[in-house]
Amino acid sequence: MSAAAPVVQPTAELMAFAGNGWAFREPVRAPARELVLATVLRALAGAQSGAAQIAASDAPGPARLRARAVGRAAATTPLYAAFLTGIAAGDDVTLATPVVAAALAAGESVDAAGATVLDAVVAGTEIAVRVERALGAAHRERGWDTRGTCGRLGAAVAAARVLGLQREATRDAFGIAATAASGLTEARGTMTAAYIVGAAAADGIEAALLARAEFTGAPLALEGRRGLAALMSATFDTAALLEGLGETFVYPAIAANVPSSPAAESLRALIARIERLPSIREVIDATIP
Amino acid sequence: MSSSGTTAVAHPPVTRDLSTAIVAFALADLPDSVLHEAKRSLFNVLAVAIGASRHPGLDSILRVARESGGAAVAPVVGRTVRADAHFAALGNGFAAHVDDYDDTHLATVIHPAAAIAATLLALAPSTAPDGAAAMRAFVLGCEIQLRLGVAISPEHYDDGWHITGTCGTIGAAVTAAALMGLDAGATARAIGIAASSTVGQREAFGRMTKAYHAGKAAANGLLAATLAARGFTAPEDALEAPGGFAEALATTHRIGSLDLNLHANFELAKNTYKPYPCGIVAHPAIDAAVALAARIGNAAAVDAVVVHCNPLVPELMGNLTPGDGLQARFSAVHGVTMGLRDGTVGLAQYDDALVVAPDVAALRARVRLEPDEKMPRASARVSVRLTDGTTIEETTTHARGSLERPLTDAELNAKAEALMEPVLAGRTGALRKAVSELPKAADLAALIAAVTA
């Protein structure tokens, strides 16, 4: 009997990585800390932007699960908090932004520890970046905004981790988010570019909450014949997706690139020890004027 | 005119001109026959949604709505609970599509009404439209998504997109914009936001996500119009721009020649309604089986059945041994079996336990599909050999529910009754009346009372 080539099951392998609840160690966590800081500072800077103001005017009141957007005192639903944080962070952000926005809002809604949120950002961003690499330039050339596609997947993974979903439910969340992947780079220069970031973050949480409530999604959402990769890119490099997954971390740190201020410095100091915070609320508290 | 992702073609300002036409559209512009079809579409989709309102997927959505939704003001079909506009849109759209029993525009395979009716119910409390405004918004949302669908068909669906979710998102934004009374500029921006939040990959079929597409389309369209109403900026050429909706979502398209005349050529007039809750290619054979049932009496008298059918029937619905109701929806032999056995084929005939019942499985094993290249898709011939040796036969030329043989109003009413009565006993008449009188109604109170528990 000849040895068959191992069957590559991208979605299943990603979920095995995402849904196992490992705590990550240094130096793997270091870029995630930078991403949280960058997102919080950008969202704080943009909390009074026109797009954020408009979106905030329709924020629903809080439900049983409640969360606040960065820089806003009023509690709302975790979906809407993530939406507002994403919009406030603005257009000029990476696909890590919806992941962080989702992790923060989902985290506050269940009073998660800082380390839980940080590790959710690691897992979500690592998957988002690997999917982006696998889809390659052809994905962007077709007009897709990777914050709304790859970022949405990462947001779902991050929210699923924060909510403590098991592997099967995480896969459902991933499938739900995948089929809602959207966002056109054509929207650049309008508020809709920021909307794409916020909607990706909110949809990530929605997907995780639905999956927790036993809503089902496609098991081969990424690689299936009619799945995200086939529909949204001409290429799909499974090696770029899976090689070294869980061992070699490829997601990059992004500097916040906002002017220094006392508020920024105190947030930097707080987030530098995020993994020791008993509650992620402390981070959001520090952004409220 | 056609274009591809690699060729830059200057398009007329489709999104702007379409938005202008949307704002100018008056319900009086609609021919009576199309208004009648719009009412049939709305009646059908609400009855179907009520029939599916006990689905566990709707339970899931409402659970999330309870823990994470805003103020619960909007109606949910078949239920006493309400939900916020977002989750009402999600839940109602899901219920309307999950049984695959809603309407079908055959040329595009769009199920137009699910997302649009869901948008209407979700926004009813906040926009408080009178009946005419509601009907106008419903017609616009259905019609615009169908015309968009025509412009990107068949490439878009063939590429693997679930056109009900993608075009549905734009349609829902149009309905929401109409209910909110947005001007042409804001309507164009609502479409622009919606174009960056389309939903639906066909990989999601076979899971709850297929029907999630219709619900999420409604929720995203609603959000797009809400933001646009407050001045949120968006591309105002999102449909036709390079890298816009048509180019991103179809390998080739004809968006530049989108029909903008909202006085004629209504695609909604070609909407159809399924008489049976299963794949449409099996419907001609099921028609014949239902007709034969009256002549057979007891199904125990059936010895062998041959279904002469188009080759697409075994190809798309070739499952001979379905293990549950969902699989049975893609089993032509199951549909024929139930038609012969019960003389009617509705949701009850796709009950999980019934599908695997020994007597049903035994009868199903006696049914054979005989593909015939010369048999048209809309036709079928079913031959039944009885235990006494005689053979009886029935031929369907045009299936019930096809464009050539639309469901009559009486048949549609019977379908609605079968769906609604087990859930909301005695309400079918109230719903029929509320939809029929909608254009003259002062508000949606009667309609909402008819669809909620």
Image (cartoon, coloured by chain):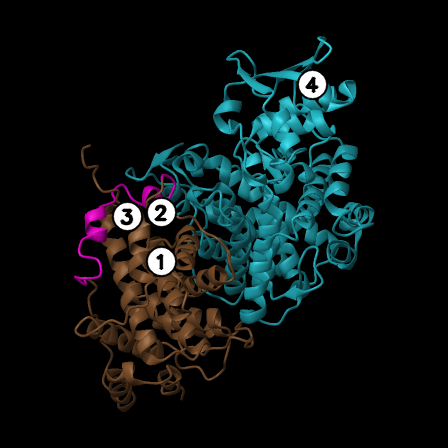
Chain colours: A brown, B cyan
- Comparing labels 3 and 2, the label whose residue is closer to the camera: 2
Q: Circle 2 — which element?
A: helix
Task: For residue B113, say whether it is visible.
Answer: yes
Image point 44% across, 81% down: which residue?
Answer: A72
* A34 up-or-down from A93: above or below: below
- Comparing labels 2 and 4, the label whose residue is closer to the camera: 4
Cβ–Cβ below 8 Å for labels 2 and 1?
yes
C-alpha distance separating marks 2 and 4 = 47 Å
* B401 up-or-down from A15: above or below: above
Number of the label disc, if any, that sits on residue A228 = 2
Number of the label disc, if any, that sits on residue A153 = 1
The three-letter code of the residue at mark 1 reads: Leu
The residue that label 4 is drawn on is B302
C-alpha distance separating marks 3 and 2 = 10 Å
Which residues are the magenta region? A225-249
Chain of the residue displaying label 4: B
Chain of the residue displaying label 2: A
C-alpha distance separating marks 3 and 1 = 15 Å
